Image: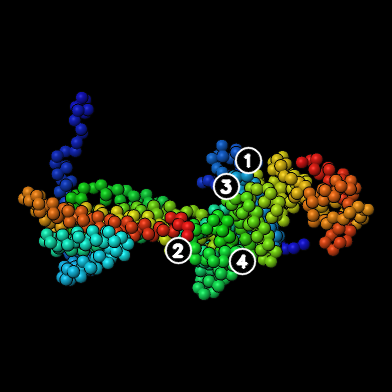
Amino acid sequence: MIEFFTTFPEMSKAGLRLFKKTVDGAYRNFSREYGDAIESIFDPILYFLVWFEKLLQNSPWPIVILVFLVLIYFGSRSIYLTIGSFVALILIGYFGMWEDTMSTVSIIGVCTFISIGLGIPIGILMSGSDRARSLVSPVLDIMQTMPSFVYLIPVVMLLGIGKIPGLLAVVIYAIPPIIRLTDLGIREVDKEVLEAADAFGANRRQKLFRVQLPLALPTIFAGINQTIMMALAMVVIASMIGVKGLGQPVLKAIANQYFTMGLLNGLAIVALAIIFDRVSQSYGKRLQQHRAGSRE
Amino acid sequence: MSKVKIKIQKLYKIFGSKAKEMTQEVKKGVDKDELLAKYNHVLGLDNINLDIEEQTIQVVMGLSGSGKSTLIRHINRLIEPTEGVVLVDNQDVTKLDKNELLDFRRTRTGMVFQRFGLFPHQNIIDNVQLGLSIKGVEKAEANETAMFWIDKVGLNGFEYKFPNQLSGGMQQRVGLARALANDPDILLMDEAFSALDPLIRSDMQDQLLELQKNLKKTIMFITHDLDEALKLGDQIAILNGGKLVQNGKPEEILLNPADDYVTKFVQDVNRAKVLKVKSIMISNGQGTEGPKVNMNDSIESCLPIILDTRSSLSVVDDQNNIVGSISDKEVASILRNN
C-alpha cells in the first residue's frame, strides 16, 4: 500500500518500448511512402527561395545595398535609420559576411511572406467565430512553446535536411503572432462603426475589406513585425538542419569556440533585426495616422 | 389621415438562451426585474404596438435600459425580434431573407448613431458615400451626391478631412449627410444628438427640422431628453422597462401623462414654453374684446400680454381668422400644475 504513494504507477518498460517503436515505425513507413510526394508539394516554394537567394547574392552588391536603402527610407522615412543601415551593411560586407547575410535575408523574407499569406486568412477565420478561435488558440500555444527541436525531428524524418524543413521550422515558430494579432485587430474594431456598416447594408465581404481589415491594419502590422523578429530568432536553430546563412557560422563558432566569429555573425543578426524592426514599426505607425487626432 | 408607414405589432425581444420560452412567462405578466432575477434573461421589449405615420417624426423616449435603442434596431433588423411583426409599407421586415434584408437596408433606411459610427480611416466625402458605394453606385455619381449633402449640412470645404479632425457637431453632420445621401424614406436616429454639447445640439435640432420641411422623411428619433423630444416630435412614445407606456402628441403627454413614470418625466418641464396656445384655448370660434394672439405661439410668449391686460385674449390662426379665446384662468391652471 505504501508503495503506491512512493512510486508512481508507471506503465511497464516493455509496453513503453513497444509504444514508442510502433509510433516511430508507423511514422517512418508514412514518410517512406509519402515523403517524396509531400516534398514535391513544396517544390515551388523551394524554387522561389533559391531564385530569391541567388538574386540577392549574384546581383552586384552596390545595387543590392542601394535597393535596400531605398526600401528602408520609404518604409521608415528616417534619414538616420537609412544612414545607420548603410554603415551596418558596409561593415557586414567588409567582415566577409555578405553572402551569408543575403541567405538569411532571403529565407526571412520568404518565411515572412508565407506567414502573412497563411496567417492573415487564419486570423480572419478566427475573428469570425469563437469556435474557430477555441480550436486554433491551443494549436498556436503548442507551436510557440514546444521546443523547436522536437518538431524538427518529424520534419527532418519526412523531408530530410535542407532548406524546406528549415523554412517549415521557421514558419511554425514565427506564424503565431500574425494570426493572433490579426484576430485581435479585427475583434477590436469599434462595434458602432461595424454596426454602421451593417445598417447601410454591407455584406460580409464589404465589411471585411472596407471596415475590419483597414481598421485592424496597424495591429496586423504589429503582428508582422513580431513575426519577422521571431523568424530571425530561429535562424541559428534552422541552420542546424541545413539552412544556409548567418546561423551556420554561429553554430561553427559554438562548436569550435571561435569567439570573434560568433560575435561578428551574432552582431550581423542583431543589425538585421534592428533594421527590420524599425522599418516595419514606423511603417505600421504611419498606417494609423488617422487615429492620431492631428487637427490641421 | 395620412398613411401608416411603420407598423409594429406585438413585438417582444428577450435576450438570453431560452428567449422563446421566456416570452410565455412575460406574456403571463413577469416583468423585467423578475425575469432577470428568476430566469437570468433580459427583457428588451414587452409587447410593443406602435404605428408611425408617414412623413412624421416619431420620438421614442425613455431612460437607459428602457429598450428604446433595442426598438429602433428592430426597424432595420440589426436586432432580431423574439416574437412579433414589424411592417414597413405593409412588408414584414422580420420575414425578409438575407439578401432582401441587405437590399432593404441599402434602399429604405438610413441610420444615425449616438457616437456617429464614422469610418475613421476614410475622409468625409468617402464616409458620406458609404451607402452609395455599398450599393455599387458609380464613383462620379456618388461623389456628386455626397458633395450635395455635404453642402446641405454645411460642411463645405471639409470633404477631404478625416473624422477625427472635425468637432463632435461636425462629425454628426457627416453622420446625417451619410444617412441622407442614400435617399432612404425612413431615417433612424439613435440618440443622434445626445453626445453633443447643448448649444450644438440645439443647432442640430433646428437643422433637422429645417431639412425635414423639405425632405418629409419618416423619422424615428430616440432620445432620453424630454426637451428634445418635445421640440422634435410629432408623436412621442415613452418606454419604461421594455413596455410602451404612452404614445401621443407632445401636449397630450404633458397634459395627460398616462402614469407616474410619465408624470415624473414631465414634471420639470417649463410648460409655458412648450405648450402652444392652441392646446389650451377654448375653440368656440368666438373671440373676445382683448388683443389677439396666434394659436401657434407658446403660452410663454403671450404671458406678458395677459399680465398686462388682465383679460381674455382672442386667438387667431395664421390667416388672422378668430378661432377661439384664451383667458388668464386657463393659463393659470395649466401653470399651477407645474
Q: Residue at x 55, y 55 (%)?
A: B168
**Comparing marks 2 and 4, which lies closer to the viewer?**
4
Q: Residue at x 79, y 51 (%)?
A: B301
**Chain containing the residue with disc 4:** B
Q: Nearer the viewer, residue B279 or A29?
A: B279
Give the labeled residue for mark 1.
Answer: B31
Report if residue A26 is visible in the image.
no
- Mark positioned earlier in the residue sequence (4 or 1): 1
* Image location (x, y in percent) of residue B116: 54, 56
Give the number of the mark in front: 4 or 1: 4
Q: How crowded is mark 2: few (under 14 residues within 10 Å), some or many (20 or more)?
A: some
Secondary structure of residue under mark 2 = helix
Q: What chain does badge 3 belong to?
A: B
Q: Residues within 10 Å of mark 4 (few under 14, many from 20)?
A: some
Q: Which amino acid type is marked by label 2?
A: Arg
Disc 1 marks a residue whose amino acid type is Asp
Nearer-the-camera pick, B82 or B148: B148
Residue that carries the numbered disc 4 in the rendered image: B152
Location of mark 2 (residue): A210
The answer to whether dots 2 and 4 both sit on one chain is: no
Label 2 vs label 1: CA separation? 42 Å
Few, some or many residues within 10 Å of mark 1 (<14, 14–19, 20+) = some
Look at mark 3 in the image and give the residue it sits on: B14
For the residue labelled by badge 3, is the local secondary structure a helix, a strand or a loop?
Answer: strand
Element assignment for label 1: loop
Left or right side of A201 for B186: right
Q: What residue type is labelled 3?
A: Ile
- Going from N to C along the chain, the mark reached first, 3 or 4, is 3
